[in-house]
Image: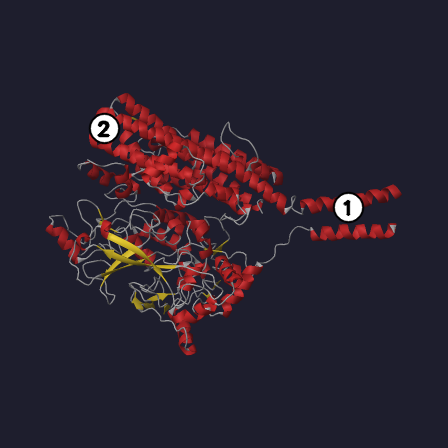
Amino acid sequence: MKNNLKNFLFASMALILVFNLSSCGGGTIEEDDKEMLEILDVYTNNTVIKTYNLLANNAIDLFELCENLQESPTDANVLAAANKWKEARKYWELSEAFLYGPAEYNSLDPRIDSWPLDKNTLDQELAKDMTGVDAPHARVYYGVNLIGFHAIEYVLFENGQAKDVSKITTNELIYLVAVAGVLMEDCVLLEASWTDDISSTKKRILEEAELEISSNFGYEMLNAGSAGSRFKTPQQAVREIIGGCETIADEVGNEKIADPYETKNVLRVESWYSWNSLDDFTNNIISIENSYLGGMEGYRTGKSLSDYVNSKNEQLDKDILEAIETAINAIKDIPSPFRNQLDNPASAPMIEAAMDACNNLLDQLSLIDEVVE
Amino acid sequence: MKKNLLTFSILLTCAFFVACDPPQQTELSEEYYSGGVNGTAFNRTSLAYEQPAPAVKDLAAFKRGEKMFENNYVTGEGTPFSGLGPVYIRSSCIACHPVYGRSKRVETFNSEEYGNGYLVMIHTPDGKICESFTGMLQTRAVPPYLPPVDESGIHITWHNFTDQYGNVYPDGTPYSLIYPTVEIDRSAILLPVPDDYQVSIEGTIGIFGTGLLDAITDEDLFAERDAQVARGYYVGEIGGMIKEADGSEHPGRYTYGCTRGTLQNGPGSNAIWNITNVTRPDRNYLYTTKAWVEKMGELGLDTVGFIGGFNQTEMTMAEFDDFMIWHRGLAVPAARDLDDDDVKAGKEIFYSIGCTACHKPTWTTGTDQYIPGFSNQKIWPYTDLLKHDLGMKEPGLRKMCRTTPLWGRGLSYICAGHTDMLHDLRARNYEEAILWHFGDAEQSREKFRNLSKEDRHNLVRFLESI
């Protein structure tokens, strides 16, 4: 009895101690905040900044290859620039689960990736004397429908292939170098808006373009809940991650795939000249995966949102991971190029399955809100 | 002792488990539901201004309408979102409403810069738009057409303003205020203009909640005006009667000048036509002036249909209906942190120093024919929807401005990355916005100036929370 009583007392006190330390929800507020900050650290440094770093690096390479093409117009140089466009494009699409923050309020998203291209105005521009047209000119005088990835794509690609160099005019090369310069500057600005740890080359690019950095958003994510951050709690910042993932899952399923499919209008297909659409969509879903698992493929270390969800609701974590995988596979099942499938009855089940998979992913992601208190 | 210890231990354990029952869902007070139960979304992320209200039933139409707001219109025919121009102000709605919110203050006018939502007006000294120009100046045109004004000739200058107290609170804390003046080089103006022309700018406001404001009855609006007349101070002016297509008339409640009476004929339904000049069956004509059309004719350009309208239009009524479902259906973000002690203290100050005289906290909507769920909702917009004179230095075209709704404004920094306010965005934060309240509101301004630093902070915390 004594022993029993002693055990009971110890058990009671221990239980109280444990609960006091861990609080009712499975972690004290301090522990929960700490866990959230760890997730934000991995996400900010290893997912977002890493992706933007690779995007900016590739955009710089792309600009140089476009300059090279202008200096020596050959089929090989068109191909080199076109391949680099695809690589840079990949990192942009891998960033679309985090289009909030600087990408949004500094208008870098529309500047980097607006569709449709204003081809009529562009054709009129290209018919003019283009002497003196360069990146500073394009930055001031060209609207978002004349710059960005699709402007470059228009010059470099035709029917899904690198264009025959004989079909690229001198004016188009001038335009290409100008808009590739703006794209490079905007991609570097995007990286610099999340971290001040950028290379000297990138610092020089920003200085020469006279671009100002409005905030260090990465710092604000890493210091959520502290002075200097717009996020009053770490949970608020983590909710941005979830919101970013939900937004792109919705956009891929209900806009990027659904709009052209439902209207049967091939002009609604993004990345129309390069036929890169399906890669774009797949990379968008991988962007969600990277946000959820932390880091990027082959570069995953530390605490992730997935770990946190798993600790609170193991089944939900499994469902989300499965929904991501299903969406990626469903998109890959659509025959390429997407633009040729809109009227093809044989492709309809695959297209609809991909739309359903994205919507299922959206539904699963929306359940995380119940876990992150 | 052992018994006591046992009892203590049992009690402590029980007490702990009682305290640790799954957290009860405390019912939120009605004040959290800024847009009423059916018009409020609980989201405080950067997506807070973009949510559909719970009352919206056709979410597919809402999404289609959203895309029309977000996408850029392009020139020519056949491609998606075509029909821009031949003369226009911006190529998209979102360019002026960053992240669906209000526009930001800029130093240099560039209509291609997203977030710069300034609309420019060329007017006479007594406030009439000069007849060569549209009410909102067009600075873009599709080649070979030329815009009425080359926008590189627009110059915004920001000046420091010092009040009668040398910009110092009684407690010694300094503050800073700025205001804009705008000029356009005569050489940048293509059309005839009187010698004494003046130029003003106005920023855009947010879009959410406008459907709920539409559901407030005219009778309640008149009653508020009558109540203010009866009280004899801070008396607001109601908007003029606006005639609608169906012949009915309603007092203006939208825009800074209260120049629009209903949402169906409101700033958004108008803007998606006249900002882009994308025509639709109920607006099958160009937003332009005779002077501009004649000038283009002189230049030898085709102007067929520019005056009098077109047979074919660029947007269908079905598309416009989707746009309006989205426009009406945007939810108001729920209020936040109202139970925080600082916020509660700030609320007391808000109610005690006269802010509510014009920033009327709440209304109850009438019957809404468009979104039935918006009917009979108690909403918290903090506006009387009437015009007041804030006695500002260089107010520009509008001396009298509608009391701007305060709901959701505290999320502007999270959503749109800035906290600029007032009709020309001269206030860079809440504090400066309050300090620009001269004229009708000067007494409240004085009370604010005489608050302690902590009370001023708490008042701002309350404003950030609603």
Q: Nearer the viewer, residue A296 or B300?
A: A296
Relative placement, left or right, of A297 versus B25 is left
Q: Nearer the viewer, mark 1 or mark 2?
A: 1
Q: Nearer the viewer, residue B405 or B254?
A: B405
Q: Secondary structure at mark 1?
A: helix
What residue would you read off at disc 1?
A13
Amino acid type at circle 2 is Ile
Q: Is residue A112 visible?
A: yes
- Can you say whether A63 is above or below B26 in the image? above
Q: Quadrant of residue A157?
A: top left
Residue density around tag 2, few if under 14, some if 14–19, many if 20 or more, within 10 Å: some
Indicate how the structure is coloured in the image: secondary structure
Pointer 2 chain: A
From the top left corner, tell me how far across and down residue B178 is, in percent: 36, 59
Relative placement, left or right, of B192 versus A30 is left
Q: Residue at x 29, y 59 (%)?
A: B181
From the top left corner, tell me how far across and down residue A133 is, in percent: 23, 37
Q: Secondary structure at mark 2?
A: loop
- Can you say whether A320 is above or below B282 in the image? above
Residue density around tag 1, few if under 14, some if 14–19, many if 20 or more, within 10 Å: some
- Residue A168 is marked as 2
- Residue A38 is marked as none
Q: Residue at x 25, y 52 (%)?
A: B279
Q: Quadrant of residue A336?
A: top left
From the top left corner, tell me how far across and down residue B118 is, in percent: 31, 54
